[in-house]
Image (cartoon, helix red, strand yellow):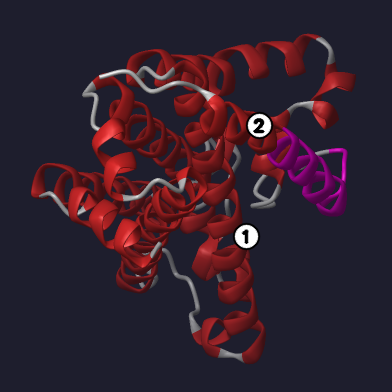
């Protein structure tokens, strides 16, 4: 499986994918953090969903990761697209058959591809965090934000907690992308289905019938980053996400293992 991981990493480190993805994620994170601190206290809103974030809040231990946390959903959608495309294109280009010649163990291929893509997502999240923290420190004087609490034990704990939650959320979105890639075997269909569902359909359904929000996969994955005031708990979201991902992952893994592979 180690060889599968390295082979997949060779694909993921292509400059057209690696550099462009990391640059876009870093710049967007920096932009959202910049707007949060530059427009601090603006009645028109400078935070998530138009909420007003004050200098007093940003001066708390959680202030250092606020900008990073609000882009967690965006990072998740990027991961979904990458996982889906890298999985489904093996069918589109007919390369899966060649992989199976070298490594007949289908589950080893699947596990190796998944691990390599998770490592890619970890790098993406770490770069996003670094850019957010750098911009936060740079603009703190302008926003009249005190940064002393950011380096306390509470601040370090908040940083580590946010990083862990965002990594978990991004990995969950990525897993959904891989599941869709295996299911549809087409990058365009897998990405379109995931993006339309999470960006449009879920939000409409949760807005029209609020009681459904606690059962929707995207709402529960987003709740892991604790950037919105959901009516259901973090523990509930962990359980729901585990059920969704384990059940759907087991189904598509079985399909992957039993499906015939054409040229």
Mark 1: few/some/many CA within 10 Å (<14, 14-19, 20+): some
Q: Position of residue 121 (x, y in %)?
A: 40, 54
Q: Is there a contact, CB below 8 Å, between mark 1 and mark 2?
A: no
- The residue that appears at 47% across and 16% down in the rendered structure is 184
Q: Left or right: where does residue 66 sit relative to residue 143?
A: right
Where does label 1 land, which residue? 165
Q: Is residue 199 visible?
A: yes
Question: Magenta residues, as a range?
Answer: 231-247
Q: Left or right: where does residue 226 sit relative to residue 173?
A: right
Q: Position of residue 219 (x, y in %)?
A: 70, 33
Q: In the figure, residue 86 lies in which quadrant?
A: top left
Quarter of the picture containing the N terminus is bottom left
Q: Which mark is residue 178?
A: none
Where does label 2 land, which residue? 218
Say what secondary structure mark 2 lies in.
Answer: helix
Q: In the figure, residue 63 lies in which quadrant?
A: bottom right
Q: Judge whether 27 appears above or below 162 on screen.
A: above
């Amino acid at each position: 499986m180690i060889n599968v991981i390295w082979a997949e990493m060779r694909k993921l480190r292509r400059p057209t994918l690696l550099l462009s993805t990391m640059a876009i994620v870093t710049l967007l994170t920096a932009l959202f953090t910049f707007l949060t601190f530059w427009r601090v206290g603006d009645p028109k809103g400078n935070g998530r969903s138009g909420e007003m974030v004050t200098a007093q809040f940003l001066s708390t231990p959680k202030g250092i990761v606020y900008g990073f946390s609000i882009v967690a959903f965006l990072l998740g959608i990027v991961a979904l697209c990458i996982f889906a495309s890298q999985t489904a294109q093996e069918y589109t280009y007919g390369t899966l058959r060649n992989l199976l010649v070298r490594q007949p163990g289908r589950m080893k291929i699947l596990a190796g591809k998944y691990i390599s893509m998770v490592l890619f997502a970890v790098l993406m999240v770490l770069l996003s965090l670094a850019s957010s923290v750098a911009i936060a420190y740079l603009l703190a004087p302008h926003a009249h934000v005190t940064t002393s609490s950011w380096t306390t034990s509470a601040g370090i704990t908040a940083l580590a907690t946010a990083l862990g939650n965002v990594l978990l959320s991004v990995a969950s979105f990525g897993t959904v992308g891989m599941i869709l890639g295996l299911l549809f075997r087409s990058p365009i269909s897998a990405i379109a289905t995931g993006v339309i569902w999470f960006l449009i359909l879920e939000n409409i359904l949760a807005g029209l019938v609020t009681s459904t929000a606690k059962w929707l996969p995207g709402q529960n994955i987003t709740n892991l980053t604790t950037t919105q005031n959901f009516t259901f708990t973090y523990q509930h979201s962990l359980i729901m996400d585990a059920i969704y991902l384990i059940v759907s992952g087991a189904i598509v893994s079985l399909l992957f293992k039993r499906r015939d592979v054409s040229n």
